[in-house]
Image (tube, grey):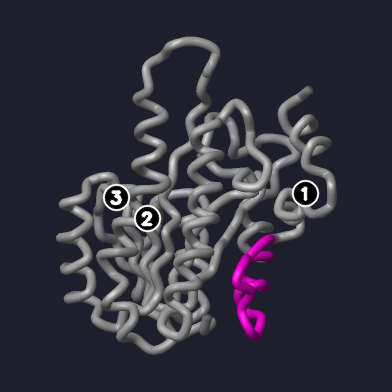
Amino acid sequence: MKTSGNTILVTGGGSGIGRALAQAWHAAGNTVIVTGRTLATLEETVAGRDGLHAMALDVTDAAAVASFAAEVTARFPALNVLVNNAGIMRFEDLRGTRDLADAEATVVTNLLAPIRLTDALVNHLAQQADAVIVNVTSGLAFVPLAAAPTYSATKAAMHSYTQSLRAQLTGRVDVIELAPPAVQTGLTPGQESREGYLPLNAYIAQVMDLFSQVPTPVEICVPNTLAFRHAERNGRFDALFAQLNGH
């Protein structure tokens, strides 16, 4: 992936990792478009930054995704990078019959939405030079957090989907997986200052260093993620799962 000169679309760009990535890529010399449900938070992301643009989109709305794809490619015909970052994390109690609204919303937001947006943009991207799709997963794709079972499952599914997407798009669009560890963001209540989580600015600095490598790694895993990524290979899965889940 080029470090500059791209036109990059970042979903979930109104806060957290999405906002920080968008601003870092913009500072590196890229045109960046951020999407999210709430225009006000997107405008905070782009404030005072020429070349950083806000476009509202509810990624869970299939019809809106299709119309958005047509609009964004018309406004930004040089669009060559899609970053599927938008996601939600809900804690769930599986020990009895329950309301499945959180689980269903998680599947739609974290799995169906990036599949739909990728499908809507893949033909356009395949016609661009230096085209890239970046799918944001999680360290929990490799070692699940039992308290967030559907979140962990959707990230594992996106890891698998990304591998298949990469194989099918070889020679046409580069496909990169970005798997964050526990980072101090607003993904869950109180997470912005949670002890032991990686500060957001430190995480973004590590990510940008990895993206600047030539060639760009197909998996962007900072040191805090690598223990999760290689837990199975290193025979550490059971111990890490027990440690993560307080057993």
- Looking at the picture, tell me which residue is in the foreground, 103 or 20: 103
Instruction: Identify the disc placed on residue 111.
Output: none
User: Circle 2 is placed at which residue position?
Assistant: 114
What residue is drawn where x is 84% and y is 47%?
Answer: 235
- Closer to the observer: label 1 or label 2? 1
User: Circle 3 is placed at which residue position?
Assistant: 59
Q: Position of residue 186 (x, y in %)?
A: 51, 39
Q: Residues within 10 Å of mark 1 (few under 14, many from 20)?
A: some
Q: Position of residue 57 (x, y in %)?
A: 25, 52
Q: Position of residue 141 (x, y in %)?
A: 60, 47
Q: Residues within 10 Å of mark 3 (few under 14, many from 20)?
A: many
- Looking at the picture, tell me which residue is in the foreground, 155 or 76: 155
- Closer to the observer: label 2 or label 3? 2
Would you say 60 lies left or right of 99 here?
A: left
- Lower position in the chain sequence, tag 3 or tag 1: 3
Q: Amino acid at mark 1?
A: Ala
Label 1: which secondary element: loop
- Lower position in the chain sequence, tag 1 or tag 2: 2
Q: Amino acid at mark 3?
A: Val
Q: Amino acid at mark 2?
A: Pro
Q: Verify CB contact (< 8 Å) between mark 2 and mark 3.
A: yes
Q: CA distance from mark 3 to mark 1?
A: 32 Å
Q: Position of residue 168 (x, y in %)?
A: 44, 73
User: Circle 1 is placed at which residue position?
Assistant: 231
Q: Which residues are magenta?
A: 206-221
- Looking at the picture, tell me which residue is in the foreground, 206 or 133: 133
